[in-house]
Amino acid sequence: MLSPQGDLKKGEIADHADREAELVQRARGGDLPAFEELYRLELGRVYAICLRLTANAELAEVLTQDTFVQVWKKLNTFRGDSAFGTWLHRLAVNTVLQYQRARKRRREKEELFGDTSSPDHADRPPREDMRIDLERAIAALPERARMVFVLHDIEGYRHEEIATMMNTSTGTSKAQLHRARGLLRKDLRR
């Protein structure tokens, strides 16, 4: 698994972490320019996780912005027990999961009351212009299988953590991962 800093050397990673810690402290004090710099530093990483979890570029942009709104609101709850990037990553995952739960409830309510007229932009098929076959295949996975695959195989979460985040059992997480891997193998053989 690649580090979130990409190909940075040890000294650069330490400098990045020190700079990030300084920006977090300043932003917690209400320093908007410091928050803007944190935003610029972490934007790509947050967008990437949102895109992988949703397989929808427009929705990923919206959820990335929602994540940073949450960061601004909750920055004072960041205790520093882990790296800021780890905390931010978890917040991004939770933002996507909350959106998907709300969408599911909305869909259930529409089905219950017979209202199917509202468009759900998140249900659009994945973009055809994706260049990498694996990204396209991941995007084509069923939602829950895709989420477990991304969280486990790409982001490195354990099944117990995924089960907690997705409000499901560890066995279900494992089954969804098995399903995702099988579907990916089948799709990539074509």
Image: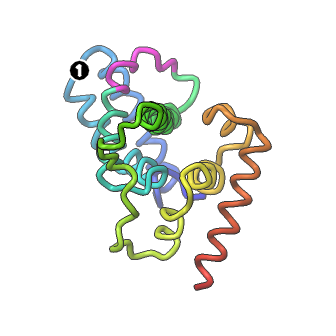
> Which one is in front, 70 or 174?
174
> Which one is in front, 95 or 155?
95
The percent coordinates of residue 69 (x first, y second) are 31, 28
> Magenta residues, as a range?
70-79
Whether residue 88 is visible to the viewer of this picture, yes or no, is: no
In the displayed structure, does residue 146 sit left or right of residue 51?
Answer: right
Give the residue drawn at x 59%, y 49%: 144
Q: Quadrant of residue 106?
A: top left
Give the residue drawn at x 36%, y 43%: 116
Task: Check if residue 77 falls in the magenta segment.
Answer: yes
Whether residue 2 is visible to the viewer of this picture, yes or no, is: yes
Give the color scheme: rainbow, by chain, secondary structure or one colour.
Answer: rainbow
Q: Farthest residue in the left direction?
A: 33
Q: Farthest residue in the bottom direction?
A: 190
> Which one is in front, 48 or 100?
100
Give the residue drawn at x 46%, y 52%: 5
The percent coordinates of residue 167 (x first, y second) are 64, 31
Residue identified by numbered label 1: 31
The percent coordinates of residue 6 (x first, y second) are 46, 58
Task: Check if residue 159 falls in the magenta segment.
Answer: no
The percent coordinates of residue 53 (x first, y second) are 49, 50
> Which one is in front, 117 or 126?
117
| Quadrant of the snapshot with the N terminus | bottom right
Give the residue drawn at x 58%, y 85%: 190
Going by the numbered disc 1, the residue's amino acid type is Asp
Establish if 177 lies above or below 101: below
Q: Farthest residue in the right direction?
A: 171
How dense is the environment of label 1, judged by Cα within 10 Å: few (below 14), some, or many (20 and up)?
Answer: few
Determine the secondary structure under disc 1: loop
In the displayed structure, does residue 188 sit left or right of residue 120?
Answer: right
Magenta segment's dominant SS is helix
